[in-house]
Amino acid sequence: MNIQARTHCRVLVSHHEPLIAAGLVAALETTAGMSVSARDPAHPFAMAATDSDVVVCDPPALQDAAGAFGGARLVVLGERSREFDIRRAFAHGALGYISKDCTLGELVDAVRAAARGQRYLCRSSALELASCLAKAPLTAREREALQRVAHGHANEHIAGELGISSATIKIHLRSAMRKPGAQSGTEVARMVPARGFPPPAQRPETSVVRRHAPGRQARSTMRAMRAYQQ
């Protein structure tokens, strides 16, 4: 696929929400040098990868991007600009990431950059990623511990899930709190969803109750974090 050899760019929109897909098509088809079509959810493989140069898709489409889009260059439209979402998009081969608060100009620029084989972030995503890069990166264990404590998991349960001691959990949490500069368990609990870390893969059965009682979950998180700070 030699996009640079021609000025015309074929864009495929793949989004699970029909209204958003229609809006993207309407926004892009007014741009000179672009022909735009939408992927039919009922016939997802109706348009072959060779029929499109750039695909604008939502994060769920990344799961089958290799099979569905082949060598097409990807621009991901995410709900928000969060570190985890941005990194996951790039890890799945996307060249661009934009969020729903981006401007029409940023949408067009993202498609054009992808057509040239260049990476692109909208302004809000670039600011978020720059802010996260300024902080020391979390280790895999620190991230796993943060995910679980932010979702109300107890010290002993986290240790059992990860196969390490409670004392080691405390070390990971203390280290993680120093890196983002959080001063309390409440700040840590807010930081986890803000950076886009997903919930842990496995949850205890009692988590169903906590999910419907945010006040109880917050109190549990703060009690756990106070224990880690001791």
Image (spheres, grey):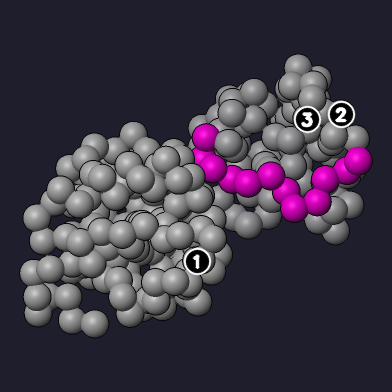
Asked whether the beta carbons under mark 1 and mark 2 sit within 8 Å of each other, the answer is no
The residue under label 3 is: 211
Q: Are marks 3 and 2 in contact (CB under 8 Å)?
A: yes
Quick one: 124 or 45, which is closer to the camera? Answer: 45
200 relative position to 163: left or right: left
The residue labelled by disc 1 is 44
What percent of the width, then of the height, locates residue 196? 54, 43
Kindly identify the amino acid type of the residue bearing the numbered disc 3.
Arg
- Asked whether residue 67 is in view, the answer is yes
Alpha carbon of mark 3 to alpha carbon of mark 2: how far?
Answer: 5 Å
> Per the image, is 16 magenta?
no
The amino acid beneath tag 2 is Val
Few, some or many residues within 10 Å of mark 2 (<14, 14–19, 20+)? few
> In this figure, which residue is indicated by the disc labeled 2?
209
Mark 1 / mark 3, whichever is N-terminal: 1
Who's the residue at 44% across and 71% down the image?
46
Magenta range: 194-205
Nearer the observer: mark 1 or 2; the answer is 1
